[in-house]
Image (cartoon, grey):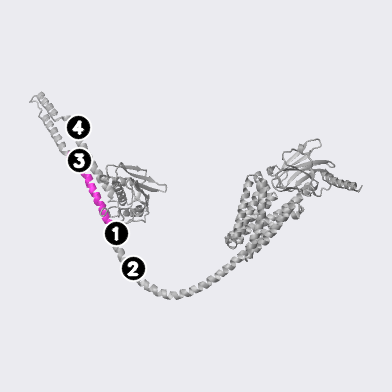
Amino acid sequence: MPIRFFVLVFLGLLWSQFSKAGDPVVFKDSSKLMQIGASLELYSDSSSKLTINDIVKQRFLPSGQDVPNLQISAFTNWAKFSIKNETDVQQLLLEVEYPTIDEITLYEVLPGGGYKTVALGQLKPFKERRYNHQNYIFPLEIPKGETREFYFEVRAGEQAQLPVYLGVETTMNFKNTERNFIFGLYIGIILVMALYNLFIYITIRDTSYLYYVGYIICVGLTQASQQGYTFRFLWPNNTWFATHDTLLIPIFNGITAAIFIQSFLHTREKYKTGHTILNAVVVAYLLCLIPTFMDKYFVANMMSQMTAMFASLLAIFVGIKVSIKGFIPARYFLVAWGIFLTSVVVFVMRNFNVLPYNDFTYYALQVGSAAEVTLLSFALANKINIYRKEKEESQAMALLVSQENEQLVREQNIILEAKVQERTEELQTSNKELNKVLTNLKEAQTQLVESEKMASLGQLTAGIAHEINNPINFVTSNIKPLKLDFEDLKGLLKKYEELGPNGNIEEQLKEINRYKQQIDIEYVHTEIDSLIKGIEDGANRTAEIVKGLRTFSRLDESDLKSVDIHEGINSTLVLLRNTMPKNVTIIQDFGELPKIECYAGKLNQVFLNIINNALNAIKMKPVQGDEKLTITTRLMENKQVSIGIRDTGIGMTDKVRERIFEPFFTTKDVGEGTGLGLSIVFSIIEKHQGKILVESTPGIGTEFIIYLPQNVPSTQSYMS
């Protein structure tokens, strides 16, 4: 009898538990919110393939918790409950205050059969929600006195709970407004601390403050993502980021925390092993990104939580080690980090239902992180006092050193004044000698320049004499045959003059024809034309040479004048024609150039020296072929004129190219050159406020590129 009694009592109690869980939630007071988690019945679908029609046939178990804990699960979880409305309000709201669930669907069993479905979650864009809130809010239409049965389908890739509230819109809005206000205060503290430390970083340029700003921002974003605010305000239409931010942001939070701790505790100097440990923490967090981007939610969550747990313990260990060495900021860190870890423990214990789901456990993590960032900001601010103290000590030391130096300076000044006087007298004597030497050098330079000019003139004169001799010889050689032809013509004219009525006209005409045949009158006419044309060509050639010589010398243009660059180049080529090898082809690639202001005679000397050097470089090639001398002119965009003179000669090495404009530098044999030609060229171009560049490749050739302004400033004067 007693045994049977106890069995019946046990079965009755067991039935009472099941019946309580299965009883409908009775909503009686519209002025209050109801937390109905204890009335939920749960079922876990390990296949994640069952539909609502399959689920209604399954056996659900009572949750037994005010806030059912779904843990970290890869399965689909179902919740079953009923609601009976005994108020006059027909429009009710059902809220799940856990905004990081990937998919949550509410099925309402309709009285006539079928289901009314509302699907929410982070896998759907935020704009599809009926209520603009980060929590999942479902509208319910339950007439007074009626009961409705509901099912929740929940999929979450991370830790999930079901804090379910039932009420009307006014009470629901009041609770959520309070939550938003408190979170706004928290974000305000985070932003103030971030801006404050950023301002200090800009002021003193200590990277610890910059690292801390990054850490504070990540802390704030971590809390915002956990509360669903990031999905609501930052990326409402990016479902991928919405489902990943609760993993990505904490990972970057851990990385910035480790880097900040290294900088704040000076682990590189204070505790090298700790510095290495924190580097390992950074690597561990980075490894958590691999399963995160592979959408392995379960693996990524487990890895990140394990990394966070060990990283927190290691941070405390490193802080203790540095604190033992007498580093005062480490104590601030231990206090702040201890408060933060305490709030984390409270948060974790709430998630596992060790502590109840209430306002204290709900806000614990926000309060702890706010206290942590505030305390660490104070600790960083204390570093300014340390810097000030160090600065004062260094200034005092600098003042002492300055006083000692001042004493030394006074003692040395007496000695230096005597030495300066002595040295001044020596310098004055040396200055007189140097002025004398400088005068001698200027005279020698003038003589050398004149010598170079005379050498160039002598070479040019010999070439011109030979060049003029050719057309003159051509003229003189044509004069003698032209005289003979004229004698024949004179004889023919004489015979025509002897014609008269007294003689036999017919015989006389026959005699004249015989004479024409004898002198070959047609050939005489042709030869005369040819000889006259040859004389004319010789005369023109001579005139051309004389004109080229006049253009080249510009004896009547010693001042600045607008001249045609092409005219100067052509006159130079005319005068150098006799010295050009027969295998050299002159290519004139001239662009359209305006007249430029220059000292024409001096500029022609530049062309002469460069072209002459180019011809010498071609002649020095051991193997002669079809060689080219290319002259290119262009008008540049900056209103400068460029003249390029490129040869196919022997070229030069970089070492030679760097020295070619030095006075007296030459690669010719002794006695063949003064080494002043290109030095004079450089001086002339410089006086025109232009520049000259040289490009050369040994064995291929050399190109001189001259840049000249269109107008030389009027203040510029040229001294030869």
Q: Where does label 4 land, which residue?
A: 526
- The three-letter code of the residue at mark 2 reads Asn
| Side (left or right) of 489 relative to 281 | left
| Mark closer to the observer (4, 2) | 2
| Magenta stretch: includes residue 288 | no
Q: Position of residue 201 (x, y in %)?
A: 59, 59
Label 3, label 1: how many angstroms apart (C-alpha)? 44 Å
Mark number displayed over residue 474: 3
- Within 10 Å of the Cα at label 3, are there few (<14), some (14-19), or many (20+) other Cα atoms? some
Nearest the eye: 65 or 169: 65
- Within 10 Å of the Cα at label 2, are there few (<14), some (14-19), or many (20+) other Cα atoms? few
Mark number displayed over residue 445: 1
| Side (left or right) of 616 relative to 295 | left
- The three-letter code of the residue at mark 1 reads Gln
| Magenta stretch: includes residue 461 | yes
Q: Position of residue 612 (x, y in %)?
A: 29, 48
Residue 259 seen in the figure:
no
Label 4, label 2: how many angstroms apart (C-alpha)? 80 Å
Q: Where does label 2 land, which residue?
A: 431
Label 2, label 3: how many angstroms apart (C-alpha)? 64 Å
Residue at the spot x=65%, y=63% of the render?
Answer: 331
Q: Position of residue 570 (x, y in %)?
A: 30, 45
Q: Relative to 387, say whether 498 is above or below.
A: above
Q: Earlier in the sequence, mark 1 or mark 4?
A: 1
Specify the segment rendered in magenta. 449-477
Label 1, label 4: how many angstroms apart (C-alpha)? 60 Å
Q: Earlier in the sequence, mark 3 or mark 4?
A: 3
